Image (cartoon, rainbow, N blue to C red):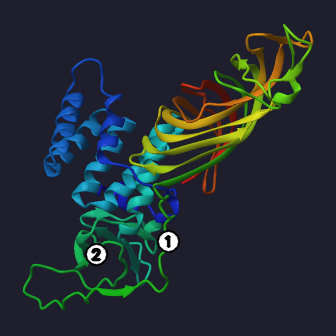
Amino acid sequence: MSDGDARRSRKNLQPALTAGLVALACFAGAGDALADTSEAERLFLEGRALMLEGRFDEACPRIAESQRLEPHVGTLLNLAACHERQGKVGSAWVEYQKGLTAARAEGQTDRARLAEQRIAAIEPRVPWLRLSLRSARADVVVTLDGGEVAPVALGTEMPVDPGPHVAAATVGGATVFEERVELREGEHRTVLVEPGDARSGGGENVPPAPKLVVEPTPTPAPKAPAERSRWILEPGIYVAYASGSADRPSPRNESTVVLDSTTTSDRTSCAALSCDYGAASVPGTGSAGLNLFAGYAFTEAFRGGIRVLAGPMFAGGSVWAFGPSIAFRATSTLTLGVFGAFGDATISGYAEVSPPRGYRHASSGTTVPVRGQLAGGLGGGGEVALRLATLARGELLATATPFFLTSSQGSSFALPLGVAYRFE
């Protein structure tokens, strides 16, 4: 960790949220590479290739040098990811914080979200060290691992990497205190620095510097925000334009279809005879209902699960469908997907009546109200979800889920538009 990083206090660093992957960080850095070949680009590409091979000890110095030569948000996030995989979670935490600040300043929302997720994931693992000087002395210079600690940072917790560290104090260039302390992941320590007499190379017996005093932090560290679950529940409501047709409808009341014999004066109805009915269709009507998705986020960008839609048609009848759904996050606010559908639709409409041979309609009307079903239809649909707002436990979405069903009995189509809340 650099001298500047060590001087930063925890209070001056921004808070954090949820998880991501090294591969995604690698992807985030690609867009910042220069169009022409440069030393910084060469080092970055070499470092990224080594990261993908798992050779982080070789990768991190190359990416760090690339960032020094030509600073970019993507390169900085790659460096943080590399240090994270090395186990240097203190360095990674500081670099993710810097990347978050830079990404927000440049309006790079995807990279800011990635930085937030990684900060939240590693923050519980970061060791924190507080160096306290027993007595304020203007001539005492306190260092940590060879880097000077600013006076304003003394007495304040600083993020450090797990492992051994050397705390020292000098006066006029002469060492008056030096001790080692080793921190484990997530550990909080307070080191009390007590400068003694300067150590000299002469023959005088100089008393050794007092031992390092390490005290546990009296108060527990604040808990990092819990990572969001990968399980997703997305309940919603919709209104829709819907239409459909039934190839084999049934009259609602066959006794209302009155027929006269063409050879006698007899009068009867289709209830007593076998009449034929033409296809019934609903040219266009409204519908409203529920739109539910339940599934799992396999990655930050890809999720799968089951989608269910169901509701009545305003002209009569109903429609419902369910099936497997997959979707990916196209941008930070837009999700696109598709789903397969199995379901049914009840179609209410009017159909032509064909009397049997020897009979004719008793009135001028030749259509009657009928009802038909798809009797198990197959189909599919698309999914579009636009994030309207991010709330405490999820996201408020505007949704569009057009779908169709078809079977040997007929077909149905609906274009639902609605709102949903995605719990994550």
Residue 141 location, x and y as percent? 33, 70
Image depth: mark 2 or mark 1 in front? 1
Answer with mark 2 or mark 1, whichever residue precedes in sequence. Answer: 2
Amino acid carrying mark 1 in the image: Lys
Residue that label 2 marks: 184
331 in relation to 153, above or below: above
Residue 382: percent from left, percent from top: 54, 29
Residue that numbered label 1 is attached to: 223
Image position of 415 with respect to 228: above or below: above
Residue at screen point 77% across, 26% down: 370
Q: Is residue 53 left or right of residue 318?
A: left
Task: Kindly identify the residue that appears in the image at 13 percent across and 47 percent down.
Answer: 58
- Please state if 297 lies on the left or on the right of 207 as rendered: right
Q: CA distance from mark 2 to mark 1?
A: 17 Å
Position above or below: 172 against 50: below
Query: Which quadrant holds residue 388?
Result: top right
343 left or right, relative to 269: left
Q: Residues within 10 Å of mark 1 (few under 14, many from 20)?
A: few
Q: Position of residue 43 (x, y in %)?
A: 19, 34
Disc 2 residue type (three-letter): Arg
Secondary element at tag 1: loop
For the C terminus, which image quadrant? bottom right
Q: Is residue 272 left or right of residue 132?
A: right
